[in-house]
Image (tube, rainbow, N blue to C red):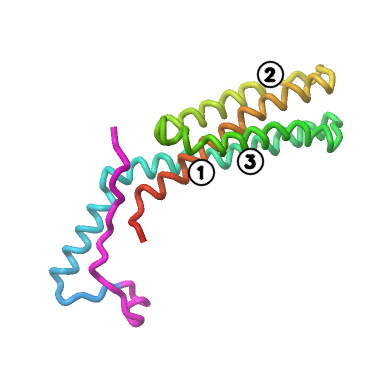
């Protein structure tokens, strides 16, 4: 299991002058130094510390896209079923409210469970929310549909903030301190 205790250190021994910025060539004293810096940079970029960063960042990016699409699909489906703006806003109320309370507790969850488990829990809850939305029956009365979709959206709201915790925390853990 990979830990995130040490940030990845990129080589900072070379500096760019204004003239070198156009060519992106580091200012060095000899050719051997340039080769060593390239090898050092290549080694640090392919280190095992960046693997979790890539996995978690990709998960967060894909989650963000699917979460936005999910909300649009719910909104458009509710519009097609002639729900009013107030009824649709009620459907999303628990999504936002659950997000607020999850944000308050997310730091403790991340410290106690770790980033990996927090991210996996968030992604799993998103799947639960999507699965529940597949059960939305168009024959239900509006009040039943509103309650059902609101509960499904609650899972998506919790998932959003748990996944966001992992996505934002891993960046801080693998970048050099500035």
User: Image height check: is 36 above or below 136?
Assistant: below
Identify which residue, 38 or 150, lies in the foreground. 150
Q: Main secondary structure of the magenta part?
A: loop
Residue 32 drawn in magenta: no
Q: Residue furthest bottom?
A: 19
Left or right: where does residue 150 sit relative to residue 20? right
Decide: few, some or many residues near mark 1? Use Cα within 10 Å; few <14, some 14-19, many ≥20.
Answer: some
Decide: few, some or many residues near mark 3? Use Cα within 10 Å; few <14, some 14-19, many ≥20.
Answer: few
Please identify the quarter of the rendering in which residue 35 is found.
bottom left
Q: Mark 1 and 2 residues: CB-CB less than 8 Å, in contact?
A: no
User: Image height check: is 143 above or below 19?
Assistant: above
Of mark 3 and mark 2, the one earlier in the sequence is 3
Going 28% across and 58% down the picture, which residue do you hit? 10
Residue 116 in sight in this render: no
Going 19% across and 68% down the picture, which residue do you hit? 34
Residue 135 in the image, given as x and y percentages of width and height: 68, 18
Q: Magenta region: which residues? A: 1-24
**In 3D space, how far apart are the residues under numbered discs 3 and 1 (Cα atoms)?**
11 Å
Residue carrying label 1: 61
Of mark 1 and mark 2, the one earlier in the sequence is 1
Residue 10 drawn in magenta: yes
The N terminus sits in image quarter: top left
Going 86% across and 31% down the picture, which residue do you hit? 82
**In 3D space, how far apart are the residues under numbered discs 1 and 2 (Cα atoms)?**
26 Å
| Element type where label 1 sits in the image | helix
Q: Which mark is residue 68?
A: 3
Residue 69 in sight in this render: yes
Residue 117 in the image, given as x and y percentages of width and height: 42, 29
Left or right: where does residue 80 sit relative to residue 124? right
Residue carrying label 2: 135
């Amino acid at each position: 299991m990979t830990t995130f205790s040490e940030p990845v250190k990129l080589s900072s021994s070379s500096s760019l002058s204004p003239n070198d910025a156009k060519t992106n060539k580091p200012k060095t004293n000899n050719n051997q130094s340039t080769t060593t810096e390239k090898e050092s940079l290549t080694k640090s970029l392919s280190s095992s510390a960046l693997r979790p960063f890539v996995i978690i960042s990709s998960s967060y990016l894909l989650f963000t896209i699917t979460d936005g699409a999910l909300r649009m699909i719910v909104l458009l489906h509710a519009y097609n079923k002639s729900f009013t703006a107030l009824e649709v806003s009620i459907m999303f109320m628990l999504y936002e409210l659950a997000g607020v309370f999850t944000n308050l507790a997310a730091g403790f969850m991340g410290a106690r469970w770790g980033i990996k488990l927090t991210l996996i829990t968030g992604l799993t809850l998103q799947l639960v929310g999507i699965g529940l939305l597949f059960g939305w029956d168009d024959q239900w009365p509006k009040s039943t549909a509103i309650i059902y979709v609101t509960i499904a959206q609650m899972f998506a709201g919790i998932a959003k903030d748990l996944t966001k915790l992992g996505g934002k925390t891993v960046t801080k853990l693998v970048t050099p301190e500035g």
